[in-house]
Amino acid sequence: MQRSGSGWFETLLNSHVNVSSNGEIFSVKHRRINISSIVSTMDRVYNLDWFTSASKNECSAAVGFKWMMNQGLMEHHNDIAEYFKKKGVSAIFLFRRNLLRRMISILANSYDRNAKQLNGTHKSHVHSPAEAKILAQYKPTINATLLIPELKQIEQTTAKAIEYFKSTRHIVFYYEDLITNRATLKEVQEFLRLAYRELTSRQVKIHSGPLSKQVENWDDVQKASKGTSYERLLHSDYRM
């Protein structure tokens, strides 16, 4: 799911000598135009015929890629689940507990696609505190009217994904748990049947301050959330 820490998580995985995760391969539309193109693309990856800067095909114990839910995964879930079963594919689901933080990240990233705040260049991920500070200066305005319906829709989509792929060997992780408990990364490696290594990433978190400082219309967000099950997100925080 977009802006759930998947880019950071993938760099952690690829820091392991025996992992080759090939990025968001289905972001290219022609690769997901129908189930045939999806299967053909996956075959290239699992047959070790896919070559990117992350490819370590000669010594990989775990080979894969990153797949967003809006990239054909949900539409063709039956055929994909059958393919996963046939090929013995394992899946890691990565979500965020704080969906409000995710929403802020999506809006900020969308803004930067046009604003290009870093010397005229759009960056979804950064590797220096200076760049992170520049991007974090933008505070999006959240549509308070649509806030609760959109949060509910995200939860429903998450539940559907897990239901669709319940027959696939899988595990669920949350970004916040990976941040606050680095021992969780040991669970990741055990799931992938890897020899344990210390995993590292050069990526720097962009939105690290209190939520109240990251939204332009914070009062509206508070009022819309008050009395709902999502009010807890306003006060749920963590440190990186």
Image (tube, rainbow, N blue to C red):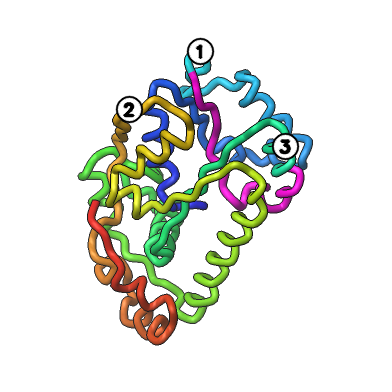
Residue 11 location in percent, x, y? 39, 34
**Quadrant of the rendered image containing residue 31:** top right
Q: CA distance from mark 1 to mark 3?
A: 24 Å
* Magenta span includes 71: yes
Hey, what amino acid is under mark 1? Glu
Residue position for label 2 = 197
* Magenta span includes 23: no
Hey, what amino acid is under mark 3? Tyr
> Closer to us: mark 2 or mark 1?
2
Q: Residue at x 30, y 49 (%)?
A: 179
Query: Magenta region: which residues?
Result: 60-79
- Per the rendering, the mark at residue 83 is 3
Give the mark nearest the N terminus, 2 or 1: 1
**Quadrant of the rendered image containing residue 144:** bottom left
* Dot 3 alpha-carbon crowd within 10 angstroms: few under 14, some 14 to 19, many 20 or more: some
Secondary structure of the residue carrying numbered label 2? loop
Residue position for label 1 = 58
Secondary structure of the residue carrying numbered label 1? loop
Is residue 184 in view? yes
Residue 56 location in percent, x, y? 48, 18
Is residue 119 in view? no
Q: CA distance from mark 2 to mark 1?
A: 19 Å
Hey, what amino acid is under mark 2? Arg
**Quadrant of the rendered image containing residue 224:** bottom left
